Amino acid sequence: MEVAMPGKKYLKFITILMTGCILLTGCTENFASDSSSQEFSIEAGEDDAKEIENEEINAETSDDISEQLDLAFPVGQAVTSSNAFTGTVYMASMINHDDVYNFPQTNHITFEPGARSSWHTHGGMLILVTGGVGYYQEEGKPAQIIRKGDVVECPAGVRHWHGATPDSWFSQMVIYDSQYEENGGSGTPQAVTDKEYANLETKEYENRNVDEDNAFMFQRADTPTTMETFSGSIYLSSIIGDDNVAGAPGLHYVVFEPGVINNWHTHEGGQILIATDGVGYHQIEGEPVQVMHPGDVALCPPGVRHWHGGSADSSFAHIAVNTNPERPGVEWFDRLSDEEYEQLTIETENQ
């Protein structure tokens, strides 16, 4: 007979009864007394109950993304006529390397389920996972399963590939040394075959530092910080230091509580902001306010006054990069008044 599958707490309760245990802690919720459920549970046995419970736990904690719309960053344009990828892949240019910010080339790449790059080499690269579940594999090593918030360093000249798992979309921001020239050339990309892909030796990424209960794209600091130059509490952490393989300045992660902004200020070497969560603002003096959503980039030139922070109704997080780190000076000024901020909120909501 077909019966409805009971919840895992109920199965745990039945299993305890069957083994003669009298400890009922945590097993009273969702208890069903209908005969069909009892019949199913008794027939299932302890091993089946554990298997079902494990499946439910895996479903609850899965990072798989089955729909493109569930990705935080825009997907960009489809890549066509390229031997660099297998399957459908999308790319968006985020930051072009130039002589103003001197920041490495930065792109955002989105893979449909099962899509992947070919084996290849290039200059040192940082991979920042922005959504879904994917693989990163260096030649001669198991493929590592990487998830939202993971940051991977791929050294220059190391042969590798990366892409989505079979059941999930996968998106990543790549920051890489586009000026790198490999001795002897990088060679022709070689596809990861279907057989190779289907028989991967895999393991979870060993350098993961994102907590399971972290609500943001990257790991938020444990405790808030208050400063005179901010209107309220922020959480400040580091994504990666300035000794990374891509030659990028250190990447800082700033989470603003709703309505918190900083003062007008200047960076001697300039600053780049990349929004990751919520809705926030950035404004260069004399220019309109930029409303920032995940995937948006704000470029503030060296020595130019600007401010940034969260919208009134949303926590807001961004990656902050102080470019040209040999010029680290920061100068702070006054802050928008409460009236100016309130008017700003009304104006942007009506846009």
Image (cartoon, rainbow, N blue to C red):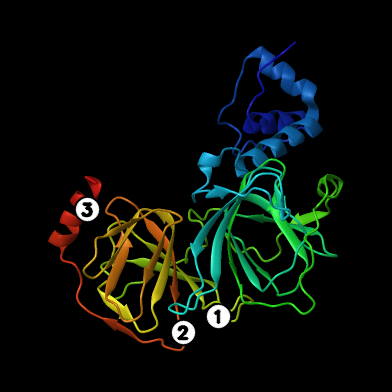
Whole-angstrom CA distance, mark 1 to mark 2, is 9 Å
Task: Give amino acid for label 2.
Answer: Pro
Q: Is residue 26 left or right of residue 181?
A: left
Classify 2 as above or below 12: above
Task: Give amino acid for label 3.
Answer: Thr
Measured as percent of width and height from the top left, residue 143 is found at 78, 57
Classify 280 as above or below 170: below
Measured as percent of width and height from the top left, residue 45 is found at 80, 28
Q: Secondary structure at mark 3?
A: helix
Q: Which residue is mark 1?
A: 242
- Mark 3 neighbour class, 10 Å CA radius: few under 14, some 14 to 19, many 20 or more: some
* Labels 1 and 2 touching (C-beta < 8 A): yes
Q: Which residue is mark 2?
A: 325
Measured as percent of width and height from the top left, residue 70 is found at 52, 42
Task: Give amino acid for label 1.
Answer: Asp
Whole-angstrom CA distance, mark 3 to mark 1, is 35 Å
Q: Tell which circle, 3 or 2, labels the residue nearer the N-terminal end.
A: 2
In this rendering, the label closer to the viewer, 3 or 2: 2
Q: Which residue is mark 3?
A: 345
Q: Tell which circle, 1 or 2, labels the residue nearer the N-terminal end.
A: 1
Q: Is residue 17 left or right of residue 287?
A: right
